[in-house]
């Protein structure tokens, strides 16, 4: 018995040491109405964690549709998938919004290499979205490494006939990785426009990532107002290869870099936003939009970018229906098309909203991955910002501590207005740029619970916004 | 130019919408001393994110040593690895504490199956730590499914000659997964002791996980005070197989389950805790312990459990040295042996501390995985608890919001005392039980930044504890 008692004691000790007490909202500190809200939010979380649908929806989207760049067969398939699924969830109405989208295709797998000390090194690259192809025999030239657009601009015609290599890495000391992305992405977007002007033969850009690995990250770029004859091919190079190339250039500044890609921009193609809504029970003319983007880059499966945002947005509506929450205002779920290279879906949605004189009072976007919840970013007037921040005590038991002012997302921000409350869902960002725009953005990188907690987080803030925003005097934005 | 301007505008808009402003501590709200601390903490984070060592240390441990169950060759190798590494980091002194540890070995890969509708189903199982083997021909018997120890106990001799199947799943509605673990693990630890008493032929226990998948989770169990002749074999069954078996038992309650395992407990083996310290500059007799456990289960590589805790603990000392932080008190890093099945290392450490009249004023343990930081759990008197909680404004910019009272960890809790401040590092727990005690607990599941942020989080709280705890009157606990 002694042995068992000791064991029991140790077990209990172990559990008490290792487990963290479930932290629920301290009900004593809440008003009676807040207690109602606290209970409702708990219901949403319980519901998603026991009967959530988003994970299997995401499996279906990523595995049976896959990567779905605007204009592709897969994107068309994704539209059908989205419309069918919204109908299955039983939204009050589901429809498609036609929109013409850019249609860029990658073509054959890209090739890159260079020779140093008589040894050929193959380099993982991928064409950037909207880039032109190289000649069919590829491009070969000496390389000039730069760290910024300014440095490139200053080179002027010295870059003529050369390949310009943009190699400014992420600032890894920034805790929020989107900030590091924001500090580097100008190289990818505008590098070719600047270097084409001065007659460079091509640009290669260090991949947008915190990691040092072998995966090139694609993403959109633009030639700006450059005349077509000055367009030069642009590719991303993996961060590890960028480091190696940089070292090799110090050893041999005259090494010749070769790359070949066969991408092209075809004529615009017809596509759609997929839209569905739960009609408001009291003021259906007031609309909250909840969405993410349906298109994705072609290299991976578009899991974290932005399959997770899509399925979470629909799960918000599913959780409302499942738990018999009848919103006062209309909750509209939108799967936006073409966020990645054009945001044509977002523009079309905003244009139609204006044309139809729709009264959008708020929006919520999930386009920062499907990782564990951290909070929301609030783009609203100061009164509504404070109102949303006052819900912290209801949200923090679910890990939602960050309720700062900031942007919402590329797809809903065209709806911005003085009285429109826009919110961006902000999950943990540490892993996001390991996968973003690469072949690694696949279903297996998404954790079921993290995804579901995101859905319930989003449903909770929509529940509160629907209940409290403009609750007395509906405002016409 | 119009096109380029539009593009620029869109790019800027995109960045402002998608990126979150880096949230640093609002310096205006801090006292001058807190500003010093805030700067020091930022230095620790910058340092780890640009020149951190823990990730490569962990790669080495998981890939070149691997799973390292107490008493195994790998555990002995891990001790050598740890001692060598501590010396390389340049701690003031490094030594080994001898300790005898249990030596259980798994033997051959376990086999399990049953036949239903003339179809044989193979079942993923693994022996539980300390379980006896089945007879070499295996065990075959009818199955009784129960959901709790109480339900099993109530069966009494009805279970004679049967296999008892413990199948109470995790409560997935609990946000903190350790709480769900705490609510289920009694089945694994005590199931066989109860069923052996009543003459069952064996027990199979649903794996301790939130997920439904094919991976059995091992872990420790005990026969308590059962006489040896009543010991029965105990195994974990994957959660997915548990669901299927449960369904099949409803179709055919008489189906016969077969399993075979060849594990055994050998005589205790000699092993060691690995200890190293930075000697305090003012009151070296006061000691803060920082640690994790060096042993791991044998099925995986012991990455999240607890390779991450080990390398983070050593990185705390590395960051102090690298940034020339000279602690007033002694910072002692301990790689505890045998946390998984016996906590002999923890007991030995506490015993020696007492014997040598060492003055431990605090401790920090990392044994909850290497995921993204969420906070710390505080086991201290109310004055010190409040002091630690007052540091929230310094810690929250790094995602460290949770500073609740709670347990610290199995390895440092034997040091508990009225004036000893014990802290458990608490990273995000959502993914932890996907890997815990399985073949999936491998290096690739650990994210470099998440791991490093954990190290800096730990270094920050140790920096603050060293500076402010007992700063005026060193307390003899």
Image (cartoon, coloured by chain):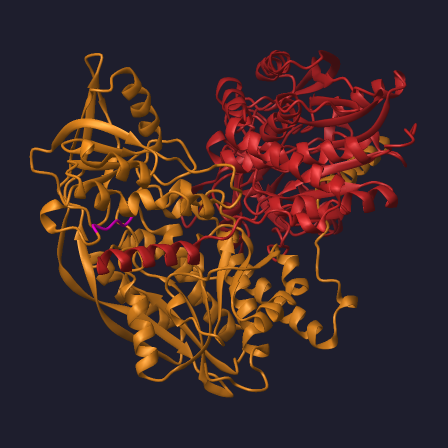
Chain colours: A orange, B red
Q: Residue at x 53, y 28 (%)?
A: B299
Where residue A177 appears, x then y in whole percent? 47, 44
Closer to us: B325 or B315: B325
Where residue A281 appears, as percent x and y from the top left, is 50, 86
Along the line of sight, the residue nearer the viewer: A12 or B442: B442
A56 vs B281: above or below? below
Residue farthest left in this picture:
A136
Residue B270 lies left or right of residue A251; in this view the side is: right
- Dominant SS of magenta comes to loop
**Which residue is rendered at x = 61% and y = 30% of the image?**
B306
Q: Quadrant of the N terminus of chain B?
A: bottom left
The C terminus of chain B is located in which quarter?
A: top right
Magenta stretch encompasses residue A39: no
In this picture, residue B299 sits left or right of residue A122: right
For image coordinates 20% across by 20% down, the residue present is A255
Above or below for B400 versus A310: above
Q: Magenta span covers which residues?
A: A219-223
């Amino acid at each position: 018995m002694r042995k068992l008692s000791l064991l029991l004691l140790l077990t209990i000790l172990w559990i008490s040491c290792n487990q963290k007490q479930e932290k629920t909202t301290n009900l004593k500190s809440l008003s009676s109405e807040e207690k109602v809200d606290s209970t409702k939010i708990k219901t949403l979380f319980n519901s998603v964690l026991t009967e959530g649908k988003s994970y299997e929806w995401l499996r279906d989207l990523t595995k049976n549709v896959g990567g779905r760049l605007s204009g592709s067969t897969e994107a068309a398939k994704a539209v059908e998938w989205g419309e069918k699924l919204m109908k299955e969830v039983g939204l009050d109405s589901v429809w498609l919004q036609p929109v013409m989208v850019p249609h860029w295709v990658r073509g054959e797998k890209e090739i890159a290499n260079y020779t140093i000390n008589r040894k050929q090194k193959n380099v993982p690259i991928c064409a950037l979205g909207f880039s032109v192809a190289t000649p069919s025999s590829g491009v070969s030239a000496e390389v000039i490494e730069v760290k910024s657009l300014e440095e490139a601009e200053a080179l002027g015609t010295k870059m003529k006939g050369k390949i310009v290599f943009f190699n400014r890495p992420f600032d890894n000391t920034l805790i929020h990785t989107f900030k590091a992305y924001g500090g580097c992405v100008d190289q990818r977007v505008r590098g070719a426009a600047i270097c084409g002007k001065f007659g460079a033969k091509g640009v290669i850009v260090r991949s947008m990532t915190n990691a040092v690995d072998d995966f090139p990250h694609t993403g959109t770029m633009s030639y700006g107002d450059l005349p077509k004859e000055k367009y030069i091919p642009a590719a991303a190079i993996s961060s590890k290869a960028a480091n190696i190339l940089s070292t090799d250039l110090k050893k041999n500044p005259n090494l010749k870099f070769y790359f070949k890609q066969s991408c092209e921009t075809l004529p615009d193609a017809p596509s759609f936003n997929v839209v569905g809504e739960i009609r408001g029970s009291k003021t259906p003319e007031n609309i909250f939009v909840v969405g993410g983007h349906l298109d994705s880059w072609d290299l991976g499966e578009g899991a974290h970018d932005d399959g997770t945002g899509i399925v979470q947005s629909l799960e918000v509506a599913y959780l409302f229906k499942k738990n018999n929450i009848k919103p006062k205002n209309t909750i509209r779920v939108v799967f936006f098309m073409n966020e990645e290279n054009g945001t044509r879906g977002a523009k079309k949605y905003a244009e139609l909203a204006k044309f139809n004189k729709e009264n959008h009072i708020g929006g919520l976007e999930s386009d920062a991955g499907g990782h564990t919840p951290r909070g929301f970013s609030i783009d609203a007037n100061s009164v509504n910002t404070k109102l949303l921040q006052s819900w912290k005590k209801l949200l923090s038991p679910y890990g939602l501590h960050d309720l700062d002012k900031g942007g919402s997302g590329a797809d809903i921000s065209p709806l911005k207005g003085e009285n429109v409350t826009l919110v961006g869902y902000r999950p943990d960002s540490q892993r996001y740029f390991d996968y973003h725009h690469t072949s690694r953005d696949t279903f297996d990188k998404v954790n079921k619970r993290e995804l579901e907690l995101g859905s319930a987080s989003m449903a909770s803030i929509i529940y509160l916004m629907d209940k409290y925003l403009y609750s007395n005097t509906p405002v016409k934005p």
